[in-house]
């Protein structure tokens, strides 16, 4: 029986140019770190890219949180200890005061039509709603993007982020960990996302995916537009439950 619906954030609930946002984020954070450390900004930016690639790696064996792995790689690559209290405070201030203002211009952040109705529909059906965004950045960055989409932390029972996750999409370990924190098995959850690669667990782990992107992946239990999802959810849930029965 489906007990929870998990939503992706970027280009699912929120329309934005994600590459532009990440570029702006890294450029700003790297500038701060460069001034504080005397290191070259370009080297810090490259270290961020390597750290994110490592977080998303398929063959990870560590049990570090994603943030701990990022900190470790950044230190090895640049000598900058992101977990030093002073540096941590500086980055946290940047994420809480500057990042929320990065949604304009080329980033083009705005709510996806139908996103609010879909999230409200989940709660109205008596199900749990959670935000399973790819956890490569901090919760503060998640909250900034959620605000651009018209959501707050109160809209979700759980939000994945670099601080509370040890794996990333599309790996089954990430989805199993996230569902487990909700007290549920993957078979009891439904994923909603726009990415035909990342929003489908690999390898398959019993999690079913509703697809709201531009393709029509055969693995999806339903494909359509976000503004159609709220009306379709009762039937999608009923069909999933009937299949389980």
Image (cartoon, grey):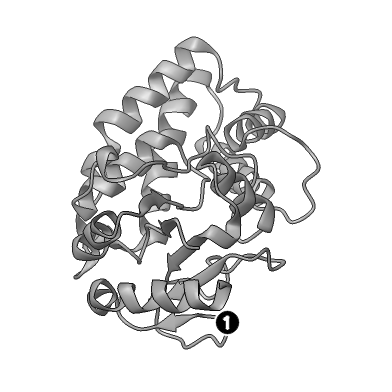
Tag 1, which secondary structure? Answer: loop
User: Residue 21's x, y, as percent?
Assistant: 36, 53
Please determine whether, in this image, residue 152 is positioned above or below residue 3: above
Q: Between 209 and 193, which is closer to the camera in this rendering?
A: 209
What residue is at 72 percent from the left and 29 percent from the top?
76
Looking at the image, which residue is at 29% across and 29% down? 96
Residue 136: give x, y in percent of width and height.
53, 45
Left of 179 or right of it: where is 156? left
Q: Height in image: 120 above or below 48?
A: below
Residue denoted by label 1 = 219
Assign the C terminus to one quadrant of the image.
bottom right
Q: Quadrant of residue 115?
A: bottom left
> Which residue is located at x 51 percent, y 46 percent?
135
Whether residue 112 can be seen here: no
Residue sitting at x 63%, y 29%: 68
Of 230 and 164, nearer the camera is 230
Q: Position of residue 145 (x, y in %)?
A: 30, 48
Residue 101 percent location from the top left of the image = 21, 42
The relative height of residue 154 versus residue 228 in the rendered view (above or below) is above
């Amino acid at each position: 029986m489906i007990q929870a619906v998990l939503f992706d954030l970027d280009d699912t609930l929120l329309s934005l140019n994600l590459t532009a946002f990440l570029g702006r984020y890294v450029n700003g954070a790297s500038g701060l770190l460069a001034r504080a450390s005397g290191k070259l900004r370009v080297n810090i930016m490259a270290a961020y890219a390597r750290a994110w690639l490592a977080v998303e790696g398929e063959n990870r064996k560590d049990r570090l949180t994603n943030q701990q792995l990022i900190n470790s790689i950044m230190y090895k690559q640049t000598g900058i200890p992101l977990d030093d209290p002073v540096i941590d405070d500086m980055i946290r201030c940047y994420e809480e005061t500057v990042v929320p203002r990065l949604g304009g211009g080329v980033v083009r952040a705005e709510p996806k039509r139908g996103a609010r109705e879909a999230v409200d529909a989940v709660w109205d059906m008596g199900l749990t709603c959670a935000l399973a965004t790819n956890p490569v950045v901090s919760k503060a960055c998640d909250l900034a993007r959620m605000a651009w989409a018209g959501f707050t932390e109160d809209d979700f029972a759980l939000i994945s982020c670099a601080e509370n996750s040890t794996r990333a999409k599309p790996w089954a370990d990430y989805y199993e960990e996230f569902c487990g924190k909700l007290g549920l098995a993957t078979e009891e959850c439904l994923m909603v996302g726009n990415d035909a690669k990342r929003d489908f667990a690999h390898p398959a782990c019993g999690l079913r995916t509703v697809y709201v992107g531009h393709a029509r992946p055969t693995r999806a239990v339903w494909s359509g537009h976000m503004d159609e999802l709220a009306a379709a959810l009762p039937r999608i849930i009923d069909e999933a439950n009937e299949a389980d029965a």
